[in-house]
Image (cartoon, helix red, strand yellow):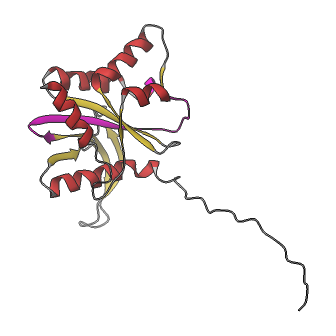
Amino acid sequence: MYNYPVKRVPYKQKSISTSNRGMKFEEYINESNEQYLKRDIAVIHKKPTPVQIVEVDYPKRSMAKINEAYYKTPSTTDYNGVYRGYYIDFDAKQCNSTTSFPISNIHPHQIRHLNDIKRHGGIGFLLIYLTRFNEIYLLECDKMNYFVERSKSGGRKSIEINELRQSGYLIKESFPIRIPYLEQVDKIIDSLK
């Protein structure tokens, strides 16, 4: 036997990238909504964004190309539909911070809209994806309002991650419904009865 020197290389576990996960958040919600519809659990869809088309080229009749378009009005929220006889309306948000979720990520017209939904008996909320922690929380309208009012009266301009964890409902990914947020909506509905 020969005694050749052996170079020992420490084993390094390959990390799994979650870099594209934030971009796919809405795609995963859409897939979940398709599963809810397919299983006849709920009818919830992504709202189309209203745009005003300004310039179109027609190189061929069947190949129209939009060159210039503008948003007509600010979009309210991303999703709406019906679940268990309740109107559901929510917006999907992402946050890359390790410390807090900025209140400025929630636009004033969205806050008004979600409050209108609640006032008329619907269920309004935010789904917040914390990309750094790979966690998703459902923050219902009343709790969102608390943090918004706090920021307006000179308090923090953000929701600390720990506050979100305490105030929101954690949504754990699963299969076949990847983001089963309606399990948490069930808790809101139960509290209304």
- Could you tell me what secondary structure mostly forms the magenta stretch? strand
At a point 47% along the width and 45% down the height, the residue shown is 134
Q: Is residue 30 above or below residue 92?
A: below
Tell which of 188 and 98 is nearer to you: 188
Inspect this view and state whether residue 86 appears.
yes
Magenta segment boundaries in residue numbering: 82-104
At a point 37% along the width and 13% down the height, the residue shown is 149
Tell which of 89 and 179 is nearer to you: 179
The question of residue 123 being in magenta is answered with no
Residue 101: % across, % down = 47, 29
At a point 24% along the width and 30% down the height, the residue shown is 124
Q: Is residue 86 above or below residue 172?
A: above
Residue located farthest toward the bottom when viewing the structure as drawn: 1
Tell which of 190 and 119 is nearer to you: 190
Residue located farthest toward the top when viewing the structure as drawn: 153
Inspect this view and state whether residue 73 appears.
no
At a point 48% along the width and 18% down the height, the residue shown is 157
Picture quadrant where residue 76 is located: top left
